[in-house]
């Protein structure tokens, strides 16, 4: 664990705590993709009612409640036009645990996993802690993983390829054609494709779900991951899910029994209520987030030297014009205009930082209302002026300290 990076969000929150008493403006926290509002009232009532069920205070099934697994199966088969069985579905303590369990079902210390960069930092943390080598797959300029480069980088030590769509941190949606190409690659190499779809419910077009689960051979190579956290505003209840073949499901069950034993019982009740009753709510949430994405895109035109490299779901991945590291940029941004973002270096590798020149940051816009998004851009504009006035005359080396 000592060779793994520290939790990035905690690092940014610690930076805020260090500077909070000296900030001149109210903080606008754009660092984390966690819904700030409470869950819908009907879901809150469902949780309260579930408190009266004695079974919800005892150990439950390792792979989750049968009713929830069956509801997931039904909903997924509707979305993906697939033929999943509930025995191929497991419920986990958040999607992070689904990822950890899935990785441990296909790879061990000394093996390799291919990961596109920029990448979700918790994925890298787990692979580092397990002693699993990371094969860095640089994304192209449009922030899509390059299948040709993936083929060139492949080695016999690679046991899986990890893809996240819509992506964290970039928000990029991977087209079905690209996913099919990666499916062909993992099938050819007899390895696994771990597909994290935590932000699936917030895609730009609800008709654009991939067709991987329609393939007759998906059970041979696919591990699909999902999170209920963002969909129903229940991040603290830690409920995720995975879909894979029945044999691997039984192997993952061992991992889950050795860690959490069972997923949170009340969280499962919340997820079940959401699947049964909150489809209209979820569609409204999706449309609201798309509106916020569009608001940000229009407002950023006020900053011609800044560029949104990609955006979607909860995030925008932004390139700034100042010639300083993303860590220093994020520190100054907080101190000068009270904006808290995550520096791009926390998602990048040494190779990908060279590609983007380490001048990027992730902006989580999903929880920010229109008027505040416009304020964000106003503050970025203010910061740009302050930077060139106060800092750019200093030697670059002094800014990096």
Image (spheres, grey):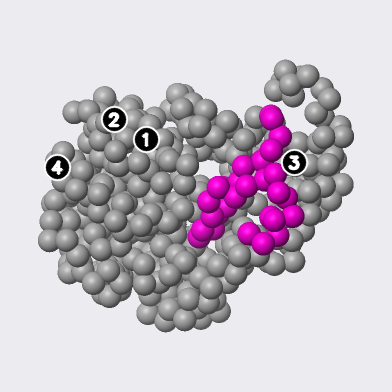
**Residue 23 pos. (x, y %):** 83, 44
Residue at 84%, 50% (x, y): give it.
Answer: 25
| Residue 137 tag number | 1
Residue at image point 46% right, 53% down: 172
Mark 3 touching mark 2, by CB under 8 A? no
In the picture of the structure, the residue carrying the numbered disc 4 is 188
User: In the structure shown, which secondary structural element does the residue marked by tag 2 occupy?
Assistant: helix
Q: At x 13% / y 56%, what residue is drawn?
A: 217
Image quadrant of residue 67?
bottom left
Residue 199 or 136: which is nearer the viewer? 136
Where is residue 339? Give x, y as percent: 73, 47
Cα separation, mark 4 vs mark 1, equals: 18 Å
> Looking at the image, which residue is at 38% across and 54% down?
174
Q: Say which of 224 and 2 sits in front.
A: 224
Going by the image, does 272 lie left or right of 45?
left
* First in residue order: circle 3 vs circle 2: 2
Within 10 Å of disc 3 (Cα), the crowding (few <14, some 14-19, many 20+) is: many
- Of mark 4 and mark 1, the one earlier in the sequence is 1
Gap between marks 2 and 1 measured at Cα: 8 Å
Marker count (numbered): 4
Q: Which residue is mark 3?
A: 333
Viewer-nearest of discs 3 and 2: 2
Q: Can residue 67 be seen by looking at this rendering?
A: no
N-term-proximal mark, 2 vs 1? 1
Furthest toward the front, the residue is: 304
Task: Confirm or deny contact between disc 4 and disc 1 (CB under 8 A).
Answer: no
Q: Which residues are magenta?
A: 297-324
- Say which quadrant the N terminus sits in: top left
Viewer can see residue 312 = yes
Secondary structure beneath label 1 = strand
Q: Is residue 219 above or below residue 292?
A: above
């Amino acid at each position: 664990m000592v060779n793994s990076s520290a939790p990035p969000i905690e690092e940014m929150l610690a930076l805020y705590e260090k500077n909070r008493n000296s900030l001149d403006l109210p903080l606008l926290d754009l660092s984390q993709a966690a819904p700030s509002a409470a869950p819908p009232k009907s879901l809150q009532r469902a949780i309260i009612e579930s408190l009266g069920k004695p079974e919800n205070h005892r150990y439950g099934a390792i792979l989750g409640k049968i009713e929830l697994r069956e509801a997931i199966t039904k909903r997924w088969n509707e979305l993906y036009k697939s033929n999943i069985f509930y025995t191929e579905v497991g419920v986990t303590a958040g999607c992070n645990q689904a990822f950890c369990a899935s990785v441990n079902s296909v790879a061990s210390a000394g093996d390799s996993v291919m990961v596109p960069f920029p990448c979700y930092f918790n994925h890298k943390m787990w692979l580092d802690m397990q002693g699993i080598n990371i094969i860095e797959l640089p994304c192209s300029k449009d922030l899509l993983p390059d299948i040709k480069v993936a083929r060139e980088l492949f080695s016999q030590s690679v046991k899986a390829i990890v893809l996240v769509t819509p992506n964290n941190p970039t928000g990029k949606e991977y087209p079905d054609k690209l996913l099919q190409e990666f499916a062909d690659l993992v099938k050819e190499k007899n390895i696994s494709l771990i597909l994290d779809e935590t932000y699936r419910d917030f895609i730009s077009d609800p008709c654009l779900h991939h067709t991987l689960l329609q393939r007759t051979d998906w059970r041979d190579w696919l591990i699909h991951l999902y999170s209920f956290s963002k969909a129903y505003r229940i991040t603290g209840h830690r409920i995720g899910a995975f879909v894979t073949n029945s044999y691997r499901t039984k192997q993952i069950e061992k991992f889950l029994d050795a860690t959490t034993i069972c997923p949170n019982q009340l969280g499962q009740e919340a997820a079940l209520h959401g699947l049964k009753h909150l489809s209209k709510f979820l569609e409204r949430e999706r449309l609201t987030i798309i509106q916020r994405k569009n608001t940000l895109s229009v407002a950023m035109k006020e900053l011609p030297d800044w560029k949104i490299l990609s955006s979607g779901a909860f995030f925008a991945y932004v390139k700034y014009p100042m010639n300083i590291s993303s860590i220093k940029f994020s520190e100054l941004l907080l101190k000068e205009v009270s904006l808290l973002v995550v520096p791009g270096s926390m998602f990048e590798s040494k190779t990908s930082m060279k590609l983007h020149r380490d001048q990027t940051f992730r902006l989580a816009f999903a929880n920010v209302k229109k008027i505040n998004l416009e304020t964000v851009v106003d503050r970025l504009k203010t910061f740009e002026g302050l930077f060139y006035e106060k800092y750019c005359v200093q030697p670059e080396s002094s800014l990096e300290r």
